[in-house]
């Protein structure tokens, strides 16, 4: 396994913006094969990028046999579209390195939790606006921020938009309104009792994707708060929060979903 860190710099980037990669090596025992890659966007309300939603999840995907790249994107006081531009820049870097890393660029899945789910879904909605980008193979969205409407996590949009917090920009970033035939398929999970980002965020996105007959696998768990990550002790907060064992099945379910898509 080779791990590297790459600085990510676009207009407005913060000094810490970076891409951390986990790339499978070839060896005499393990022949070189092209592998899919999971492009991860940790959550944090566009005010931070969560450690709990980074390496603990990344290592689960590595164990499944995937290459992984974690984008530590710029957050407030950086404002839209800096994080999205960083994501596009990072994806182009992955394309450039794809032969060296044995990455199948047609099998890059974007993954994100909470506000990171908003960024990952934004890639899914807007990738076609950049002619150098390839359609993601799919979106893996964990309790994502989606809507700027009635069920919005208002703080995420305030942190993301800052000086461009206008009706027009709120509409553009209300992603259930941005679904088109270009939107990739998705695996989504949420909890019914999420008291931070209401489950309606996922439901509204699914409803919009259904209108375009875009496949979605959705799992709604009856119990659990927000920001659960792996849902077990691996990503548990120091105060013990984050353990919801019945929700940890999402990792096995997404593995099955990915295998069926590969």
Image (cartoon, grey):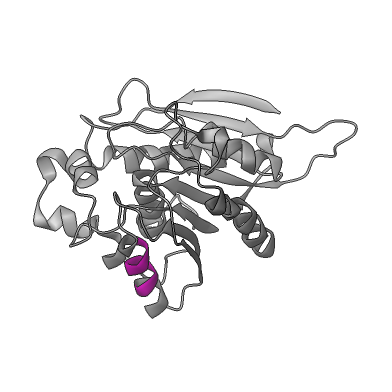
99 relative position to 155: left or right? right
Confirm whether residue 201 shows in the render. Answer: yes
- The relative height of residue 69 versus residue 115 in the rendered view (above or below) is above
In front of the other: 243 or 93: 243
In front of the other: 164 or 54: 54
In front of the other: 215 or 91: 215
In front of the other: 171 or 13: 171
Q: Residue 222 occupies which quadrant of the picture? A: bottom left
Confirm whether residue 130 shows in the render. Answer: no
**Residue 157 percent across, percent down from the top left:** 21, 46
Please identify the quadrant where the C terminus is shown.
Answer: bottom right
Which residue is located at x 42 percent, y 65 percent? 183
116 relative position to 27: left or right? left
Q: How many marks?
A: 0
Q: Residue 82 occupies which quadrant of the picture? A: top left
Q: Which residues are magenta?
A: 202-207
Q: Is residue 198 magenta?
A: no
- The relative height of residue 257 versus residue 118 in the rendered view (above or below) is below
187 relative position to 160: left or right? right
**Residue 137 percent across, percent down from the top left:** 55, 58
């Amino acid at each position: 396994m080779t791990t590297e860190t790459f600085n990510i710099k676009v207009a407005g980037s913060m000094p810490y913006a970076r891409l951390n990669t986990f790339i499978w090596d070839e060896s005499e025992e393990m022949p070189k094969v092209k592998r899919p890659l999971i492009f991860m966007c940790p959550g944090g309300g566009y005010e931070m990028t969560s450690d709990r939603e980074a390496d603990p999840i990344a290592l689960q995907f590595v164990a499944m046999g995937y290459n992984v790249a974690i984008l530590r994107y710029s957050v407030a006081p950086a404002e839209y579209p800096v994080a999205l531009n960083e994501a596009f820049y990072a994806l182009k870097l992955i394309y450039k390195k794809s032969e060296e890393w044995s990455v199948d660029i047609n099998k890059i899945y974007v993954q994100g939790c909470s506000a990171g789910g908003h960024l990952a879904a934004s890639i899914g909605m807007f990738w076609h606006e950049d002619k150098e980008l390839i359609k993601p193979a799919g979106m893996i969205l964990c309790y994502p921020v989606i809507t700027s409407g009635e069920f919005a996590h208002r703080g995420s949009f305030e942190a993301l938009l800052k000086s461009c917090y206008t009706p027009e920009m709120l509409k553009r970033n209300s992603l259930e309104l941005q679904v088109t035939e270009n939107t990739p398929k998705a695996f989504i999970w949420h909890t019914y009792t999420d008291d931070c980002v209401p489950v309606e965020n996922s439901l509204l996105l699914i409803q919009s994707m259904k209108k375009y007959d875009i496949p979605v696998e959705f799992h709604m768990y009856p119990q659990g708060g927000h920001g659960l990550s792996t849902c077990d002790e691996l990503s548990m907060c120091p105060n013990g929060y984050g353990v919801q064992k019945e929700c940890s099945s999402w990792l096995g379910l997404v593995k099955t979903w990915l295998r069926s898509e590969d």
